[in-house]
Every structure is written in structure tokens, then in C-alpha cells.
Amino acid sequence: VSQLKNYTQILREHGLRATPQRELILEMLAGSREHPSADYLFARVKERFPALSLNTIYKTLDLFEQRGLIKRFNVGENIYRYDADIHPHAHVICLNCKRVDDINAKLSDLTERVKNEVAGHSGYRIISADLYFYGLCEDCRKGR
Amino acid sequence: VSQLKNYTQILREHGLRATPQRELILEMLAGSREHPSADYLFARVKERFPALSLNTIYKTLDLFEQRGLIKRFNVGENIYRYDADIHPHAHVICLNCKRVDDINAKLSDLTERVKNEVAGHSGYRIISADLYFYGLCEDCRKGR
DNA sequence: TTGAATGCAAAATATTTGCATCTTC
DNA sequence: GAAGATGCAAATATTTTGCATTCAA
């Protein structure tokens, strides 16, 4: 999602009504590197819209995903996380602090490369790929 | 898990008491290519142990995973699935019928290869990798 | 003004916890 | 016999559904 466009415009371009809640949810996702869960977004968006319901968060996120605005995924926690960066990219998860980071930019083509390799050698017609790497982040290794 | 050993022996080798429920759960996992969920295992094991509780399934599966007997994972459904094949290997998931298959044997080293590639180029110390590929299985493509 | 979005409440799904009883070693 | 496993019940966590009210276009 381009940082230069305003969110009203982006929503309309995707055939969605521009409500203040939706704009803020999208803004938070686009401005976050944390791959937030519904619960986390609910808490943050509720600060500005105290009457907000979790229902709105879930409905909005589902809709955004259906229109291709965001991606929903699961790193193995049985919690959905959401990402405004829909460009295929792999994730690294810290087994200690549970943070979820994007993979190093040097490996930005990894997901596509691996997907293409599998596509030719599988009984399936492959449409997408999700790659997750588990380990220890720098902070946790240094005991921070 | 070797097919030749009996499950009593395998459990004891892993420091676990051999109860009939555990033996059957392990046998079912080892004999299945379906990557079953807790719920599915519960239904199947309950056929032979009608008093079985879901609690036992979950406790047993957790324990098995802690001892390295099985692997727990999540293909993006918010349901845990379990696999007695602990050898690192990628999975392909049918977006239509939701079946979860192991990747083609020709690509058996894919997970390790990709993991090693990432290990050198990441701020993380990488310990493991999970690769998921989504698409349409042969049956669904042929409209079966 | 009208169809769609929101909020509130309840339900559904999956998993975890507490505890008494029973079983394995 | 003692530590550990099982079963039953209740609790927790996350997501989904139903419906009346409000809002965007």
C-alpha cells in the first residue's frame, strides 16, 4: 500500500466504503512492521474509537483480505496475524519473544523462487507459498 | 517412527509410560498420511476407547511433541495438525478440499536447503523452517 | 434514501486447566 | 506405593454469527 495515497482513496479504489474505522485500521496495518493480530489492532484502534467492537475488526480484516488489500497468515500460534505488505515475502519468528519479522531484504525473492521450483515438481497446481523460519532474534541472543 | 518397533518400546525409549491410549495415538499418527488434527484423532481413538477424553489427546500430543516424537504445525487454518514424520519436509495444501499432503519426494531436501540459505543471511539464528505451498490438488483440478 | 457498516450480544470452535480417580512401573 | 496418566468438567482464547442501529454515498 503506497504511503502517499490517502486511505480514503485506497479504500474506494478497492470498492469499499471509506469509514473512519476502516481508514485507521488500514493506516495502522500499513504503518506497522509487527504483523499485528486482531486483538492487538482492536486495542490500538479502540483508543481512538472507544465504542469499537471486535466484530468490526474481524469483518474489516476479512474484507480487506478478500479484496487483496492485506494478507492473513498464521505462524503456528493458532492466532491470525495480518500484513499490509502483500508482496510475497518470508517471515522469521523468534522462538523466545515470539516477534515476527520480515525476512532480510537480500532474500526478498526467496518465496517466489521456491514457489516456482515447487510448481514444476508437484501434483498440485501451486498458487502461493508461505515460508516461515524459526530461531532466535538478535535481542534474545544477546539476552536483552 | 520405525514401523518395525512396537509402540510400547518406542514410548519407553522416549522416557514415556506406555499406556494403551498413547500406543494407539502414536500408531494412528505413524500410520496416517493425513496430518490429522486433535479432533480427528479423538474421534478415531474413541472408537477403541469409548471413555477417552479430548484432554488425553491434547496432553498426549503435547508430550509427544516435547519429546520429539511428533511435530505440531499449522497450515493457516487456526487448527493444529500433527505429523509422526519429524524429518523436515514441506507441505502442500489444497485450497479447495483442504487436504494437506507431503511435498513430492523429489523435493525432500527442499526445507533443509532453504533453511540453510536463510541461516546465513538473517539477523536470526535459524533453528527450523516450515514451508507451505497452496494450490489445487489433482483431484480438485479434475473436478472429482 | 438505501444498502452497507457498526456495535452489542451470544454462539461456535479449539485448546487449556483443575482435580479426583485410576494405572504404570 | 508413588509418580504419573486419564477422564470429566469448567475455563480460556480466538473467531464467527445474528440482529438492531447508524452511516456513507
Image (tube, coloured by chain):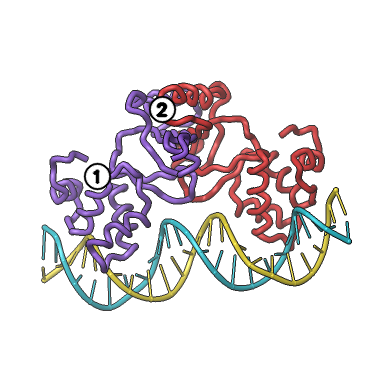
Chain colours: A purple, B red, C yellow, D cyan
Task: Residue at 81%, 39% (x, y): give it.
Answer: B9
Residue where numbered disc 2 is placed: B122
Residue B86 x %, y % = 63, 34
Number of residues whose C-alpha sits closer than 10 Å to that of mark 2, classed few (under 14), some (14–19) or many (20 or more): some
Q: Secondary structure at mark 2?
A: loop
Residues at marks 2 and 1 on the same chain: no
Task: Residue at 56%, 24% (x, y): give it.
Answer: B108
Q: Is residue B17 left or right of residue B90?
A: right
Q: Nearer the viewer, mark 2 or mark 1?
A: 2
- Label 1 sits on what residue type? Gly
Residue A95 x %, y % = 50, 40
- Label 2 sits on what residue type? Ser
Residue A49 x %, y % = 23, 64
Q: Is residue A121 left or right of residue A43?
A: right
Residue where numbered disc 1 is placed: A31
Residue B142 visible (yes or no): no
> Residue under mark 1: which chain is it in?
A
Image disc number at residue B71: none
> Residue under mark 2: which chain is it in?
B
Task: Residue at 51%, 24% (x, y): give it.
Answer: B110
